Image (cartoon, rainbow, N blue to C red):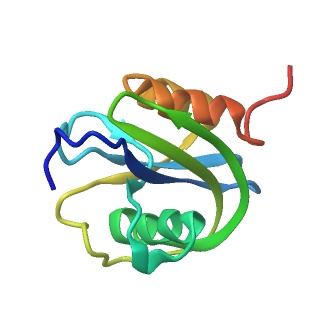
Amino acid sequence: MSKNRAVPRTVCCAIPYDRQNMKVLVITSRKHPDKWVLPKGGYESSDGELKAAAKREALEEAGVHGEIQRFVTTIKGTTATYHFFELAVTRLDDDWLEKDARARKWVSFADAVKLVAWKEELAQALHLSSLAPSR
């Protein structure tokens, strides 16, 4: 698939969290290893549902097991339409598909927002999640 397609790509994104410890799991970007992102990737027809794609991406990119708790938002970008889901983490694998390509770490909500701010849609989705402090 080329990057110059007319139809924006459908990207599904997990916001992996541990509510008990009020932490969000972030991972390093493969394209920009010095920057942090949330697990996300393209929807595949075999996923069936958008939330299943978010769950699959979290497992592949971060070794995360958990349950989707809620849909957060859809953000239309110039090259992709992003669908965000909160994922309550139940377990982390020590060995996962992209282990050699990515690091992962638990951070506070505020730190997660700062770390992913270079990708505006990721920070925006975090602010819209139920993890955001109430104003």
Residue 130 position in % (x across, y down): 78, 42
Q: Residue 113 appears at what percent x and percent y?
A: 54, 28
* Residue 25 visible: yes
- Is 49 on the left-hand or right-hand side of 5? right
Query: Of residues 25 and 130, which is closer to you in this image?
Result: 130
Determine the residue positioned at 48% across, 67% down. Answer: 53
Quadrant for residue 75, please give it.
top right
Q: Position of residue 10 (x, y in %)?
A: 42, 51
In the image: residue 124, left or right of residue 122: right
Residue at x-position 70% and y-position 53%: 71
Q: Residue furthest right?
A: 135
Q: Nearer the viewer, residue 83 or 4?
A: 4
Q: Is residue 53 left or right of residue 44?
A: right
Q: Is residue 27 above or below residue 33?
A: below
Q: Residue furthest left?
A: 2
Quick one: quadrant of the N terminus?
bottom left
Q: Which residue ends up furthest to the top in the rendered image?
A: 135
Q: Residue at x 62, y 35 (%)?
A: 126
Asked whether residue 90 appears in the rendered view, the answer is: no
Q: Quadrant of the C terminus?
A: top right
Q: Residue at x 58, y 48 (%)?
A: 84
Place residue 69 in its image quadrant: bottom right
Tally of numbered discs: 0
Residue 31 pos. (x, y %): 17, 42
In the displayed structure image, the side of residue 41 where residue 69 appears, left or right: right
